[in-house]
Amino acid sequence: MAVLVTGGAGYIGSHTIVELLEASIDVVVVDNYINSKPEALNRVQAITGKDLTFYEVDILDEKSMEQVFENHEIEAVIHFAGLKAVGESVALPLSYYHNNITGSIILFKLMNKYNVKRLVFSSSATVYGLSNPSPLTENLPLSTTNPYGTTKWMIEKILQDIYHADSTWQIVLLRYFNPIGAHESGLIGEDPNGIPNNLMPYVTQVGIGKRKQLGVFGKDYDTPDGTGVRDYIHVVDLAKGHLSALTYITKHKGIEAINLGTGNGHSVLEVIKTFEKANNVTIPYTFEKRRPGDIGTCYADVSKAKKLLGWVAKRSLEDMCRDAWRWQSMYPEGYVND
């Protein structure tokens, strides 16, 4: 019996596979390397000293995906695969809807055909939209502001309909907040293509000298220092949350949406200052206009994760900053194949 991980070579996927392998779970990975590098999985195996099975397959390729199900006795699926850049989704909505939703439907059809009805889905706090007050609880009304977020919301809805049609499914929808950091070994971390969309990889690239300075979007929010507040969670804590969710669905039927965050908010300036202090590195920055669609404060209510999964985030903001810098310092160019 094995767990199928789609998009497993990506940032969160690779860290999750480390946790799965270290828990002695057999892992089958599919990835098309659009948002990831083959070297990540080599490093995962180096960290754990354990092997995994890999297929270079696009989840839109139904025939190849079916072969994976034919070849292995899959017990459960952790579904990460998908396009993930908010700005790009606004420019290329059809690509995002086709890839993320059609690919997911193909996966769910095959799961149903092969009677694999345990699923952990990689969702996002973007499904809470702009109107809900923090801390965000899972029962709030959902809305989205960009095609990327809409694909997550639509896939959640599809899975709810699947469960209502067949109550033998066991599904957890994990709504992530802001994952940062890297594995403590420094061997795997966040390696974005091109200009980073997220705060931490931009900070580390400024620190390493790859970029001149950081642009901070907005300094007039209703927050302690005027900059946006977010719930940053260490990627290893997030990965451990997937292992907890996997354990949960082996024992419980139903469908549950669960936040994964720390339950605490940190401002952009707080992240910069913590990073500088933890690593003795100076990060020059300038203030820029707010980005459309950004909100001042967003952080999770994490009581449901603690109650249902027995999971809490344990790593501090200092840990996140230190581990992110170790990865960037060891591999300034990210995953570059030798």
Image: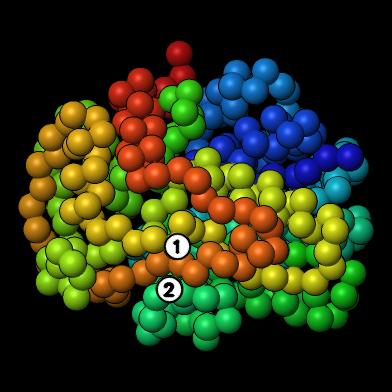
Whether residue 34 is visible here, answered yes or no, is: no
From the image, tell me which residue sits under label 1: 263
User: In the picture provided, is 198 more to the left or to the right than 110?
Assistant: left
**Where is residue 315 drawn, in percent x and y?**
45, 43
User: In the picture provided, is 157 more to the left or to the right than 207?
Assistant: right
**Where is residue 189 drawn, in percent x and y?**
44, 34
Mark 1 belongs to which amino acid?
A: Gly
Q: Earlier in the sequence, mark 1 or mark 2?
A: 2
**Where is residue 7 drawn, in percent x and y?**
61, 45
1 and 2 marks in contact (CB < 8 Å): yes
From the image, tell me which residue sits under label 2: 135
Task: Tell which of 124 and 139 is nearer to you.
Answer: 139
Between marks 1 and 2, how big is the CA–CA gap?
7 Å
User: In the picture provided, is 36 more to the left or to the right than 332?
Assistant: right
Disc 2, SS: loop
230 up-or-down from 153: above or below: above
Residue at coordinates 52% horizontally, 41% vertically from top-left? 236
Q: Where on the picture, by quarter, is residue 104?
A: bottom right
Disc 1, SS: loop
- Which residue extends farthest top? 338
Task: Tell which of 323 and 91 is nearer to you.
Answer: 323
225 up-or-down from 185: above or below: below
Q: Quadrant of the N terminus?
A: top right
Mark 2 belongs to which amino acid?
A: Pro
Residue at coordinates 53% horizontally, 65% vertically from top-left? 302
Residue at coordinates 61% horizontally, 45% vertically from top-left? 240
